[in-house]
Amino acid sequence: MIGKIEVADSDNEEVDAEEVDVEEQTSKASQRGTNKDLPPRCQDGNRFCHHFIPTFLKLAAAGDNPWVIEDQEAVNMLQTAWKKVYGKDIELVVMVNNSVFLNVSCTSKHVIYLN
């Protein structure tokens, strides 16, 4: 489905309507991670929210450009954070678009842009 969106430029002047594929945007928005999608036991003792995400954010902040992180760089940081927080208790290989990646990228969008 194609919809039209009217946008304004920085001077609040109306510009031409732009055609946007609404289905494409909807499908991207539905690719979100939720806590119920996370591996079993990873939320025990609030480890995911209170330890894993802050560990990832610290790694991201220490990177070359913490405001823009490519997917593979994010995967490497997430895997490092996972090993630090969970060790061998819960083994997982983080990949682009798996539940951990989607959950953290959705949470982190308020702070950084994951490309």
Image (cartoon, rainbow, N blue to C red):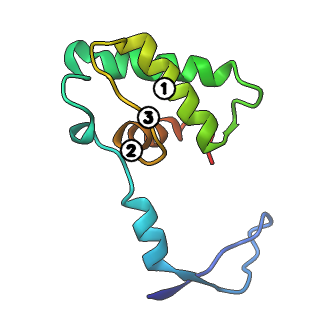
Residue linked to disc 1: 79
Is 14 on the left or on the right of 35, as rendered? right
Q: Secondary structure at mark 1?
A: helix
Residue 41: image location, x then y, percent = 19, 22
Between the residue at mark 1 and the residue at mark 3, the CA separation in whole angstroms equals 6 Å
Neighbor class of circle 3 (other Cα within 10 Å; few <14, some 14-19, many 20+) is some
State the residue in front, 39 or 115.
Answer: 39
Of residues 108 and 37, the one drawn nearer to the viewer in this rendering: 37
As drawn, the label of residue 94 is 3
Q: Position of residue 79 (x, y in %)?
A: 48, 26
Residue for point 65% across, 86% down: 17
Q: Amino acid at mark 2?
A: Asn
The Cα atoms of the two marked residues, 2 and 3, are separated by 7 Å
Earlier in the chain: of badge 1 and badge 3, it is: 1
Q: CA distance from mark 2 to mark 1?
A: 12 Å
Q: Amino acid at mark 1?
A: Gln
- Which secondary structure, mark 3? loop
Residue plotted at (50% across, 86% down) = 3
Are the two marked residues, 2 and 3, in contact with CB atoms closer than 8 angstroms? yes
Disc 2 or 1, which lies upstream in sequence? 1
Q: Are marks 1 and 3 in contact (CB under 8 Å)?
A: yes
Instruction: Name above or below for residue 19 compared with residue 72.
Output: below
**Mark 1 surroundings: few (<14), some (14-19) or many (≥20) residues within 10 A:** some
Amino acid identity at mark 3: Val
Determine which residue is flagged by label 2.
98
The image quarter in which residue 5 lies: bottom right
Q: Is residue 109 left or right of residue 41?
A: right
Numbered circle sitting on residue 14: none
Residue 66 quadrant: top right
